[in-house]
Image (spheres, rainbow, N blue to C red):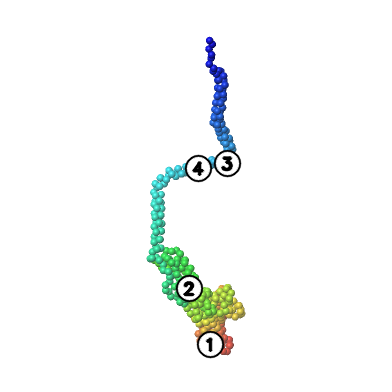
Amino acid sequence: MSRKRPASVSPRKQPASKKPARRAATQTVEARAEAPKKQPARKKPARKTTARKASAPAEPSLAAAGAQAAAGALGSGVLGLLRGVGRGLPWIFGQRDVQRLAALGILAGVFCGTSQLVAERVQTSPDYALPSRLVAEVAPPPGLSVKAAEDLSSLRLVRGAHAFDARIVPAVARQLGRLPWVEQVSEVELEPPAKIRFRLRPHQPLARLGDQLAVSRSGATFPIHYAAAGDALPEFRGVPATPEARAKALQAGAQVLADFGPLAAQVEAIDVSNLAGAVDPLQSEVVVLLSGGLKVEWGRANLDEERQDRPAEQKRADLEAFLAAYPQRGRVESVSVRWDEVTFVLAEEQSLASAGR
């Protein structure tokens, strides 16, 4: 009896048909899984190497190498200096002179701070506050009217001014210098605790020019209402209008009036129209009119050393002698003191006579 073998798959065909297929599939999956890991590992070193080669500079030049060496030496020197100073600071501050200087510096700082506080207190203290009015009541200067005193009383200081304000002195000097009757401001100073003292030189009215201006001894003009007796001042006549000729004429008239000395009180007018021979070179340049109508041919004003005639003292002495010899001056029309010999013209007879000295 034959035994029937059970139906089964042949062992040769089953492994041959299925196992190779599984291995191939396994190998393919593993290859796909490992490829991403191996690919970056191969490419990253290549990129780094390429970057280094591209950014690598050329060999440095001699100048660049020298600059780098100098910079390194400088940095080393600075560091060494700082280390040396740091090590020497304890020794430096241990010296007595240095300690004294440090102490003086501290004292100076304290003093400056204290001075600032004191200055602030002084500025706010009523003891050093200056009054708003510069001058309360003052008499007018000699020869000037009450108008000059009113000008001084009207001057005002800035609000809150104190004796330690450095702006006060120049401000007061400017105010005084603007007054029309002031010739020069000689001094302005602060007196403790809170006073202002000043000195000035006013114009001295010597004559008048018309009805509006007074003439000082220096030939300067200012409003005639500042003169104490402007109407009684002698008048300058024949003064040119041009500024330069006008200034010379006023100076000539003032000089002649000063040369008259005590006789200036008798002068009513001074004619300077023929100054420098402007009208007639043969006539007297300056003619003085005395009270009573007597004309005095004075000659030149002797302002220019190159154009002088007789000294003014001799002219005045001759005129005084003539007035003493002829007290009735109404009979004399004019007298000339231009030359050594005094001559005069009588008013009635119109004859030329010689007066003995």
Task: Determine if residue 319 is in view.
Answer: no
Q: Which residue is mark 4?
A: 75
CA–CA distance in space, label 1 to label 2: 38 Å
- Residue type highlighted by circle 4: Gly
Which mark sits nearer the N-terminus, 1 or 2? Answer: 2
Answer with mark 3 or mark 1, whichever residue precedes in sequence. Answer: 3
Front residue of 246/285: it is 246
Q: Which mark is residue 330?
A: 1
Looking at numbered disc 1 in the image, what kind of residue is underneath it?
Gly
Q: Position of residue 41 (x, y in %)?
A: 55, 31
- Reading the image, the residue beneath label 3 is 63
Label 1 sits on a secondary structure element that is helix
Kindly report which numbered mark, 4 or 1, lies closer to the viewer in this rendering.
4
Query: Is tag 4's residue or tag 1's residue first in the polypeptide sequence?
Result: 4
Q: CA distance from mark 4 to mark 3?
A: 18 Å
Whether the residues at callouts 3 and 1 have beta carbons within 8 Å, the answer is: no
Name which residue lies at 41% across and 63% down: 123
The residue beneath circle 2 is 202
Please tell me how crowded label 3 is: few (under 14), some (14-19), or many (20+) other residues with Cα within 10 Å. Answer: few
* Cα gap from disc 3 to disc 1, whole angstroms: 111 Å
